[in-house]
Amino acid sequence: MPALFVSAGFGMLDYDVVIVGAGPAGGAAARSCIAGGLKTLIIEKRKIPRHKACSGILVPAAVNSLRQTFGPLPGDVMADPSELRALRMHFPGGRTLDVPLGGVLIRRERFDHWLCRSSGAEIDDGTTIRSFQEQHDHVVVRGTRQENEKWEILCRVLIAADGGTSTVVRALDPGRHEKLDWYTALQESYECRPVLEPGYFHFFAFPEVSLYASAYVKDGSLVMEVVASRLDNVTQSMGRFRELLWPQIGVNEAKRVQRLGCRVAYAATKGLFHFGNARVLVAGEAAGFLNLFGEGISSALASGTLAGDAAVQAIEAGAVPGLIYRKYVESEKRRTLRQFSLRAYIRSNDVIFDFRKSFIALARKKRIILLLDFMRWLIKVKLFAGR
């Protein structure tokens, strides 16, 4: 466990950078900071490895980023099956559309642990940040450990990578949290033998069941996920999804082996990104990086890396980290906004899921029918920017 206590006179910095959150954004930020020669600490409120309600999909952009910065993924991080060939969209009437993906399926708890461990940063898990105070040339961070032990750290830069319900962002901008439309995501895993083709992420465009309903085979289990708005009950939404899915895939009964949930918000549709202040940088989902289909790992890795790079450059140059980071992260912000733009999907303009390519490959009649199905779903979920 790192030594975190400093004198009351604030005469010495403990770390160059403190990162809150041991997810992909935090791990990527730590990797950049360590590569730049900065003394770096990752703080995580839960003991790691820890489970998280996440599909564990690595899209090609994420895989390429990892190979460049962390190297090849270790075998124990990969799920079975590890290859994710396509996103298969299911529409009413039994129609389907395969969107080529070429991604990887990972075990999220092991993936996050590997990222943080491989970053080279010190890790203090089971530790919660309670407050922070931004000064002219440093940040004072205070918190407690699970044993109620209080601690205080001085650092040059604080990077918040603590998820969509970020404690740090709520302190920086309390009003933002209330402006966002919050949804509840629920993930359940079952022991059974479903007739569901592995290697595909099966997405069910049935808004009357759930805004987002998905299912896939992972490590021998059937994984089901739903997302509900505040006007719906997420448990009831999962029940509706079971009633829809199980008869189709030959499941009569199954033993539930895991149940995870979390809250999510789509900041991009309201332009409510938050990148921090002068010495507090915000990355990943905490900053608002989450795309239309709920995939956020690729942007978490990208924005985390940019936050770390900004910290390195600022400390080397004696500059303001926040100003540098906001310039760096603008491209990732634009990229995220494109994921909510109908025009970008029509033009196939740097979107994670290339629907245009899938539609073009179809016969004309089927293309029109599926395009109408897709548009009906988009209209019902009401999550397109500029709608």
Image (cartoon, grey):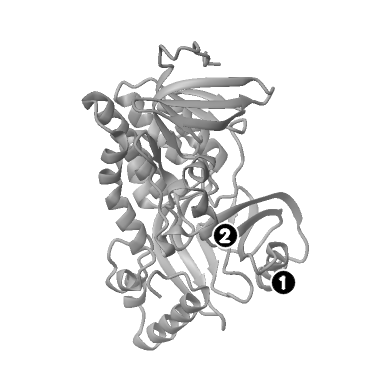
Three-letter amino acid code of the residue under disc 2? Trp
Mark 1 or mark 2, earlier in chain? 2
Whether residue 126 can be seen here: yes
Looking at the image, which residue is at 41% across and 43% down? 283
* Disc number for residue 234: none
Name the residue tied to disc 1.
243
**Viewer-nearest residue: 117 or 304:** 304
Name the residue tied to disc 2.
182
Label 1 environment density (alpha carbons within 10 Å; few <14, some 14–19, many ≥20): few
Mark 2 residue element: strand
Mark 1 residue element: helix
Which residue in the rendered view is the most extreme toward the bottom?
365
Q: x, y (%) of residue 333?
A: 33, 54
Q: x, y (%) of residue 140?
A: 46, 25
Q: x, y (%) of residue 384?
A: 42, 70
Q: Gap between marks 1 and 2, in whole Å?
A: 25 Å
Whether residue 76 can be seen here: no
| Quarter of the N terminus within the rendering | top right
